[in-house]
Image (cartoon, rainbow, N blue to C red):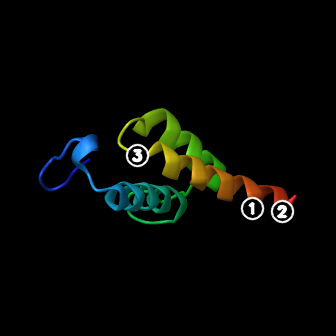
């Protein structure tokens, strides 16, 4: 979300958008103080898609979806 200067999405560096997405994904899927019961990778993607919306880079989000879906298909 452009921390600490509250930059708008357009002015954020593309790598910063990728890091923000990765950080949110890890926060949701790894146990920690903000998420004592972690979500599955697929649940995390759904949560990000529904609740986060615009702050994340769409291309990076699609790439993350592809990785998670490949891993899910491989495990099946």
Mark linked to residue 5? none
Q: Residue at x 54, y 57 (%)?
A: 37
Q: Which residue is nearer to you in this view: 37 or 24?
A: 24
Q: How many residues crowd mark 2 within 10 Å: few (<14), some (14–19), many (20+)?
A: few
Q: Earlier in the sequence, mark 3 or mark 2?
A: 3
Question: Disc 2 designates what residue?
Answer: 74
Q: Residues at badges 2 and 1 in contact (C-beta under 8 Å)?
A: yes
Left-right relation of 1 to 28:
left
Q: Residue at x 63, y 50 (%)?
A: 65
The quadrant in which the C terminus is found is bottom right
Instruction: Note whether residue 40 is visible.
Output: no
Q: How many numbered markers are drawn? A: 3
- Above or below, comparing residue 50 to residue 12 in the picture: above
Mark linked to residue 71? 1
Q: Residues at badges 3 and 2 in contact (C-beta under 8 Å)?
A: no
> Where residue 69 sits: x, y (%)?
72, 52
> Where residue 55 sits: x, y (%)?
35, 42
Question: Disc 3 designates what residue?
Answer: 56
**Secondary structure at numbered mark 3:** loop
């Amino acid at each position: 979300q452009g921390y600490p200067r509250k930059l708008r999405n357009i002015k954020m560096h593309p790598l910063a958008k990728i890091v923000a997405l990765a950080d949110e994904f890890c926060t949701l899927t790894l146990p920690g103080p903000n998420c004592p019961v972690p979500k599955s990778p697929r649940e995390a993607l759904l949560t990000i898609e529904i609740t986060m919306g615009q702050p994340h880079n769409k291309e990076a989000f699609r790439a993350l979806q592809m990785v998670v879906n490949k891993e899910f298909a491989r495990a099946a």
